[in-house]
Amino acid sequence: MIYLTRRFDFAASHRLFNPEFSDELNWEIFRDCNNPNGHGHNYELEVTIAGEADPKTGMLINILLLDEIVREQLIRHVDHKNLNIDVDFLQDIIPTAENICVVFWKQLAQHIPAPHQLYRLRLQESKNNFAEYYGPVQISKN
Amino acid sequence: MIYLTRRFDFAASHRLFNPEFSDELNWEIFRDCNNPNGHGHNYELEVTIAGEADPKTGMLINILLLDEIVREQLIRHVDHKNLNIDVDFLQDIIPTAENICVVFWKQLAQHIPAPHQLYRLRLQESKNNFAEYYGPVQISKN
Amino acid sequence: MIYLTRRFDFAASHRLFNPEFSDELNWEIFRDCNNPNGHGHNYELEVTIAGEADPKTGMLINILLLDEIVREQLIRHVDHKNLNIDVDFLQDIIPTAENICVVFWKQLAQHIPAPHQLYRLRLQESKNNFAEYYGPVQISKN
Amino acid sequence: MIYLTRRFDFAASHRLFNPEFSDELNWEIFRDCNNPNGHGHNYELEVTIAGEADPKTGMLINILLLDEIVREQLIRHVDHKNLNIDVDFLQDIIPTAENICVVFWKQLAQHIPAPHQLYRLRLQESKNNFAEYYGPVQISKN
Amino acid sequence: MIYLTRRFDFAASHRLFNPEFSDELNWEIFRDCNNPNGHGHNYELEVTIAGEADPKTGMLINILLLDEIVREQLIRHVDHKNLNIDVDFLQDIIPTAENICVVFWKQLAQHIPAPHQLYRLRLQESKNNFAEYYGPVQISKN
Amino acid sequence: MIYLTRRFDFAASHRLFNPEFSDELNWEIFRDCNNPNGHGHNYELEVTIAGEADPKTGMLINILLLDEIVREQLIRHVDHKNLNIDVDFLQDIIPTAENICVVFWKQLAQHIPAPHQLYRLRLQESKNNFAEYYGPVQISKN
């Protein structure tokens, strides 16, 4: 088993709040991230695929194909967008890095062509924090 | 003359558009940056001060003081904010990196205590682009 | 299970030596790191927490709370300090990245509020080396 | 169990092609990477060792020794080289990041002195892609 | 006057040698960079434009236009290429970072639409070295 | 005129204080940097040389030669050292980034072989601050 990772960038805005909470509670929990007019980030997404390298090409998966899948399923929906408003598959979730990772997995995993498997998503929101998700049923290494 | 630079981070959202333009023209010029619901960035601001090091302290300017000034005059107004809506001194300008740099200069330069002078502002919007401004009347090096 | 990582910086000095060794042996083993007057680093510490995102907040753990815990238990003790002299919980250990990681774990793990768990500490000492520790009893992924 | 990682840089050129394929098929699969006169990268190699810290030194493995082994077994063979032509142990393989990782493992793993073990190789080819390999039989964490 | 910089990446191979020198002299001067089969780098090119922001758009120059010009005039000729063989405008020069910078300037400067001016090219060849060129006749700041 | 920059790393400890000040005043001015037992940094030094590329080699200055000069005159004196105690040419100065830059210039400038000239030193002390010095008499660009 070998692991291949591609990195993607997108710039997006978001606001953290739970519509069921009072304004006070939203502020207490989310602080600056609760600013009503939102704020934003340069997000970095790492997509890691696990599998065997094809002996005829030396490649786990063709990078051009992987890029096309990730751009089609994820990046074009979120780049230069407002994550609370503009993205179908992020409706009704609070767009924390943790939640975005899990939703991205649901969107992407089924589109990775067998026998390869999505192994990890890593979403970096700022220099100082990132979330990682290995899926609902994890592949054991090797 | 020696130059001292401090780096500051802030996360903000913005939308690029000119209210005097038609929607079509706004789209044609600003493309993705014109998305009506905005998008965002992790901005990096570098503030460069020019002057002589104080022989008693070896410091051009006390970094703690400089940090306090920049946070008070700039960062607290823009961090986790929407640059089109939330920031008094950015009203009525299109919040491109170029424009933000010039406005930040106007806000900050007067607060740098003499004999030090603001020498340069550098605002990085994403991995691939940044603006630099040396003020309306530039200090010649040395 | 999802993983959330926060990054912290601290600047510290240290000297590597074993008081039971002769000067010659200390030099032979630790070389430049054995300089009697010490040297220093900008350390980067990554703290990774494992758990489930709270459905009401979308957060694994409130970042403000995590920051407070890590600053209180670790960073305030080591930032702008001499690791051989100034830090209670580093007395009697040789302050290599490996040893610091294990000691930091002991200091921090018990303060992470259940049901979350400390999953990994990663301590980067310089561009070219870092240590990682997953604790005395590791959480299996998922 | 603790993990210690050292990072190494090398600059090399390569060309991706399978001599059994037609020119058309090579182009279709490898695209720009198939340019007949090659291209190149600044590669970053991370070597991770797993083991226990020696209580007398606080070190998992002496970094000076590890550096010497990795330079002798890997870096001196590939730095400022053409990976298709100049490297004995890369003959007859297509020099993708995936393949290089597996070959590097075979070259290096046997030279790591017991009781330490090679745990992971990570080869970064560009800002946006890297391969990781944990060996043919993986060490379980802890 | 404000300065806007865009960053571009390209991966290329090269070999440093002077065909008028003996093999011995080429080796003595260029060392590893003289390896007959070449080596390569991930180059980073920064293109800085000087001018005034357009009051109607807040932009010095439309980034989309600048990207198109730089890709058309420079990047498509050098990305995934061998700089000694594949690039028309690099024939008959030794492809050091210094020389490439000067040649890139000649290729690019004339294509920057007035009233904007090319102000600086910065070419980073590796983590540890880069060249900068401000053109044959330099614009004075302000 | 073209500019070539090389980057060097060194790890050192220091303490900021003025022996003529009281303990209280030293603390008030230097705060954490005044810790009696010191702290440290991974310093990054950029050395920029100005001149013309030699038409026979395409090089401003041979990088191997420049590296040797900078290591001999600067790096070997400060790497893995205590800047207050171990370095002859830093005696009697307060080792701020500003002061170190000026002292490094005095040590290095005379050793750059004519017709090349030292153009700039940039010393980065941490992610968030760096000093730059262009010498007592500056070369005008071009």
Image (tube, coloured by chain):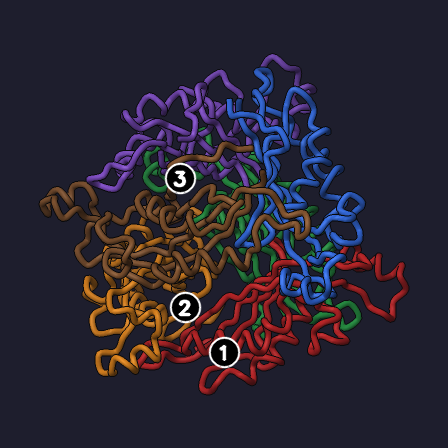
Chain colours: A green, B purple, C orange, D red, E blue, F brown
Q: Nearer the viewer, mark 2 or mark 3?
A: 3
Under circle 1, the secondary element is loop
Q: Is residue A115 left or right of residue A92?
A: right
| The furthest residue to the front | F114
Instruction: Please report, as a chain letter, where disc 3 is located.
Output: F
Query: Which is nearer the eye, F6 or A9?
Result: F6
Under circle 2, the secondary element is strand
- Residue E69 place in picture, x, y as percent: 72, 33
Same subunit under labels 2 and 3?
A: no
Q: Tell me how many marks there are.
A: 3
Labelled disc at residue E69: none
Q: In the rendered view of the protein, which quadrant contains the N terminus of chain A?
A: bottom right
Q: Residues within 10 Å of mark 2 (few under 14, many from 20)?
A: many
Same subunit under labels 3 and 1?
A: no
Identity, as a three-letter code, of the amino acid under mark 1: Ser
Alpha-carbon span between mark 3 and mark 1 = 56 Å
- Residue E26 place in picture, x, y as percent: 68, 62
Q: Nearer the viewer, mark 3 or mark 1?
A: 3
Q: Which residue is mark 2?
A: C131
Alpha-carbon span between mark 2 and mark 3 = 40 Å
Under circle 3, the secondary element is loop
Alpha-carbon span between mark 1 and mark 2 = 17 Å
Q: Which residue is mark 3?
A: F135
Q: Nearer the viewer, mark 1 or mark 2?
A: 2
Do the CB atoms of the residues marked 3 and 1 lie less than 8 Å apart? no
Please give the name of the residue rendered at 12% of the width and 45% of the height, measured from the top-left corner: F20
Please give the name of the residue rendered at 44% of the width and 39% of the height, measured from the top-left corner: A16
Q: Which residue is mark 1?
A: D140
- Residue B18 place in picture, x, y as percent: 59, 17
